[in-house]
Amino acid sequence: MNLTKVFSESELSLEVVILIIAGLILLITGILLFPVATGGLPYYENGLYGLLLVMFSLQIISMGKTPFGDLRRSKFVVLAGLIVGGIGTITCFIPDAFNDIPRLLLFLFFGPGGALLLLQMILSKDKLKAWSKYGGIFKHLIAGCTVAYVSSILISVLLWNQSLLSVQMTAILVLIYGAAVVYLSFVLRNIYSTYPQEQKSKDGEVELPIDRAMILFTSVFMIILGVLLIPVNLGLLPFSGSAQLGLLMMIFAIQMIASGSTPIGVFPRSLPVILIGLVFAALGTVSCIIPEILVYPLTLLVGVLNILGGALSLGKFIGQQASRTGREDSKIPSVLIKLTIAQLTLNVLAITFGLSMLISHLLPGLVIGVILAANGAVLLYLLYILFVIDRIQKEMETK
């Protein structure tokens, strides 16, 4: 298989990206469970639960794909996705914040959800029957879906009663599930490339392409993180710094793989960019599941990336302004001025956050929390401005 062709010939759908990363999470989890079983590594179960809930959240928000089937993407569906993502984020950050709720949610998503998806595939006229008739790559789709759905149901049984299998047998089951999900992602990528009409999206009142969905999720993530850091720094809550870094790396990874958007700028999607994104996803997974093991290197990496990204964007803006000196430009629309201000504010906040990660005690923990919450709020404002620009463009096209 030509990986360069698979990843770069056109923009990957977010569905395929999430499947690839979800499969990678499961594969890494399965591998790590073997040394965990022997006591060779510590294990942060809530980190894994929160990470999986975040992946479900992204599917719901961006595509209306719920664990129980596809829905029209409405404000209610997006809100439900944000709630699931919020629970997942807090589950990662604050040990035992919701007690058994994350495990029960995942039980519902993997068990009844997997069973319902399996029944939908068998009974729907445009799924199993049609796929069997088409043959070819669709036979691989049947195999991938079947193994994934059955594995999902078995995983839910273990979530309900974790003592049914040994940790080693659980690891093998998780590896099978992960391999099926990765296989399914490549099958869907092939199908969407050959038969674009199969890549249907549900109509709905909310339009959220990949970049907007990631802005929305990242803004909520930053606000939650910033708000939680206030009681954490007051000693009122425990906190998992390794899971925080892991989720940040996962957000970077999804953006890089889906659209070539990196913390230091947007690049054409190429095999190196994709591979770096997969490395980021792997590091993020390990950091969420195995506490403290990657805190120092990821702190340096995230800090440097935030500083570089903010500084490069600011430098680019200053260069553009210098090149316009002496020109008689037409009046700039106010909405573009607001967009520029929001972007500049984000760049300054990114640099400040990056410096606080590299220089210990540069800023009090409470101030860092305020900075992160402000970052999330500005991201929401930026998303609003982008929707305003879209509406203006549509109005101009209709005239």
Image: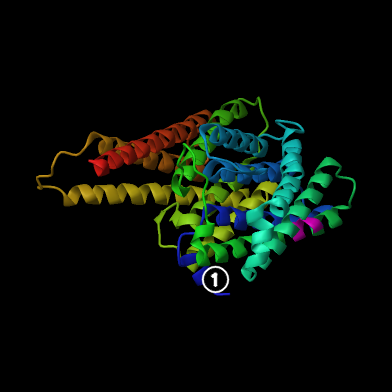
Q: Is residue 236 above or below residue 275?
A: above
**Magenta residue check for 283:** no
Which residues lie in the magenta part?
A: 173-177
Left or right, 165 with respect to 394, comes to right
Task: Tell me the crowding category of disc 1: few under 14, some 14 to 19, or many 20 or more residues within 10 angstroms, Cα based.
Answer: few
In this view, the residue in front, 170 or 36, is 170
In this view, the residue in front, 120 or 241, is 120
Where in the figure is residue 137, as x and y percent of width and height?
A: 62, 69
Where in the figure is residue 36, as x and y percent of width and height?
A: 80, 53
From the image, tell me which residue sits under label 1: 3
Kindly identify the residue that appears in the image at 74 percent across and 33 percent down.
101
Left or right, 174 with respect to 137, comes to right
Kindly identify the residue that appears in the image at 60 percent across and 41 percent down.
57
Amino acid under disc 1: Leu
Q: Quadrant of residue 269?
A: bottom left
Q: Quadrant of residue 336?
A: top left
Look at the image and name its color scheme.
rainbow
Where in the figure is residue 323, as x and y percent of width and height?
A: 17, 52
Residue 239 visible, this orientation = yes
Kindly identify the residue that appears in the image at 70 percent across and 58 percent down.
145
Magenta segment, principal secondary structure? helix
In this view, the residue in front, 365 or 85, is 85
Q: How many marks?
A: 1
